[in-house]
Image (spheres, rainbow, N blue to C red):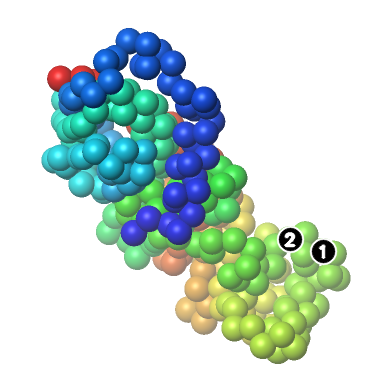
Amino acid sequence: MLPASTDELIDRAFREDVGDGDHTTLATIPEGSKGAARLLVKQDGILAGVELAEHIAKRFDPELSLRVYIIDGARVSPPDIAFDLRGPQRSILTVERVMLNFMQRLGGIATLTRQYVDAVEGTKCEILDTRKTTPGLRELEKWAVRLGGGTNHRLGLHDMIMIKDNHADMCGGIPQAIAAAKEYLQRTGKDLPIEVETRNLEEVELVMRTGGVQRVMLDNFTPYLLRKAIDRIEGKYITEASGGITLETIRSYAETGVDSISIGALTHSARALDLSLKAH
């Protein structure tokens, strides 16, 4: 299901791209002419954004229609055809770039996510996204993560108490930060999970002695130290590894028994999936 903000994003994208008119198309394409174009896959990956493309087309011109051949979340390879776009030729040409910009970005995120998911296959470890998203596109980018097989972490600052190193340092320490968080939740009546970031085994020990949290983030631990931390936590809290974990190293982290690994690169470093829209 598309996020509630989708229409606003689409309208903004058209205002940015079209301005007061697609003058090249208006100059060269006769009014009322009909045609079709195909969405061509030019790179192996995970398709993401077909549902969005259909929404873009209909929002711009109700006379546009998609005949879908491959659905969101599917593995694709050249020369796959994801869909046909049919209708007024002027509309097809004007929606092309907005449609491709969204689909290529989301497809890149879904593709990179699936690579990480495949890398930990057979372990119990989930791949999580982060808040390192493109401003204004977070909900769509997190949708693409789900299409790639990943799991959404928190959507924003509002749906979890996440005590990171700066919070703890400014509050006087991890025990003080946890106590302040619990007091805040009680005072405000909010029901939010508490997660605490730890940087070493000594901080893990502080969390275990203090208690009152639901998740422990283990930041920049080596696989060896991560396993020791997980042994100390003994399944009492959900564990999350983060920091500098790559496709080449992630398997060694997942095999420690950690519950989840958060990867900022899913949304801040994904390369666009190569797609094109061609008349036929």
Residue wearing tag 1 = 169
Please state which amino acid type lies under the numbered disc 1.
Asp
Residue wearing tag 2 = 165
Please state which amino acid type lies under the numbered disc 2.
Asp
Q: Nearer the viewer, residue 8 or 135?
A: 8
Identify the residue shown where x is 50% and y is 62%: 153
Q: Nearer the viewer, residue 275 or 56?
A: 56
Q: CA distance from mark 1 to mark 2?
A: 6 Å
Whether residue 2 sits left or right of residue 277 in the image: it is: right
**Element at badge 2?**
helix
Residue 29 appears in the rendering: yes
**Element at badge 1?**
helix
Where on the picture, by quarter, is residue 83? top left
The picture places residue 218, in percent across and down from the top left corner, at 59, 62
Whether residue 34 sits left or right of residue 26 in the image: it is: left
Marks 1/2 in contact by CB < 8 Å: the verdict is yes
Mark number displayed over residue 154: none
Where on the picture, by quarter, is residue 88? top left
The relative height of residue 269 versus residue 159 in the rendered view (above or below) is above
The picture places residue 212, in percent across and down from the top left corner, at 64, 84
The relative height of residue 121 versus residue 101 in the rendered view (above or below) is below
